[in-house]
Image (cartoon, rainbow, N blue to C red):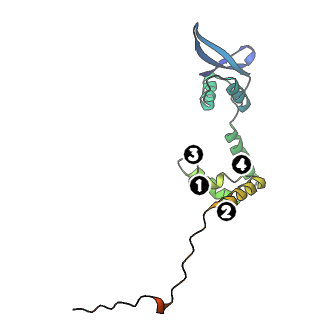
Amino acid sequence: MAYVVPRRGGTWEVRESHMTDAGPRSRTLAGFSCLTAEVIERAQLRSIGGFDPVALRQAAQRAGAPVAASDFDTAAAMLFRALADGARPRPAVRRALVEALGSAGVRPAGHGEAAAAWMDATPARRGETLVDLLRLTDSLPAPPRARPAVARSESFPRINSAPA
C-alpha cells in the first residue's frame, strides 16, 4: 500500500508499508516537491506490491501535497488553447471528440473508439499494420470455385404435375 507523508522543508515522500516478522515496516519509494507522472513511475519501479496511480494522486491531494496536472488534463488544456487561437481539428477527429465528450462513458464508443486508436499513429506504424493485414489476407483460404453451369439440354427435365 502506497501513501504520501510530508517531510521537512516542504518536501513529500511516497512510502509503502509491508508486514515483516518484526511487525509493520515502511520504506520510501520516492521523494518529491510536486507529484508528477515521473515521480509515480519511479515509485512504481521501486514498489514491491505495486499500487494504483489514481489512488496515490488522491492520497497526495488528501495530504495536501502539490499534484501536477495529469497528462490527460494537460492535453485537454492544450486543445482548449488551440481552439481559442482558431485552430480546428480534422473532421474525423472532431466527430470522435464530440462523440466521446457527448457520451456518458469515458471511452468513445463505436467507430470513434476505433478511430481514436489511430489518430496519432505514425505513417510507419500505419504502413506496418497494412503489411500485416495484407499478409493475413494472403494466408486466408481461397473461396471455393463455382461449378460451371450445366447446359439446359443436359439438365433433368422439368416435372409438371397436374391435379388428379
For the residues carrying marks 2 and 4, which lies nearer the camera in this image? 2
Q: Secondary structure at mark 3?
A: loop
Identified by mark 1, the residue type is Glu
The quarter of the image holding the C terminus is bottom left
Identified by mark 4, the residue type is Leu
Report the Cα–Cα distance between label 3 and label 2. Answer: 37 Å
> 82 or 140: which is nearer to us?
140
Q: N-terminal of the two: label 3 or label 2?
A: 3
Q: N-terminal of the two: label 2 or label 4?
A: 4
Instruction: Give residue 106's mark.
Output: 3
* Residue 36 vertical position relative to residue 25 in the rendered view, above or below: below
Report the Cα–Cα distance between label 2 and label 4. Answer: 41 Å
Q: N-terminal of the two: label 1 or label 3?
A: 1
Q: Is residue 89 visible?
A: no
Q: Which residue is mark 1?
A: 99
Query: Horizontally, is 148 left or right of 123 in the view?
Result: left
Question: Does the residue at mark 2 contact the one at mark 4 (Cβ under 8 Å)?
Answer: no
> 146 or 117: which is nearer to us?
146
Residue at the spot x=57%, y=74% of the render? 145
Q: Which residue is mark 2?
A: 138
> 15 or 70: which is nearer to us?
15
Residue at the spot x=58%, y=6% of the render? 22
For the residues carrying marks 2 and 1, which lies nearer the camera in this image? 2
Quarter where residue 159 is shown: bottom left
Identified by mark 3, the residue type is Val
Identified by mark 2, the residue type is Asp
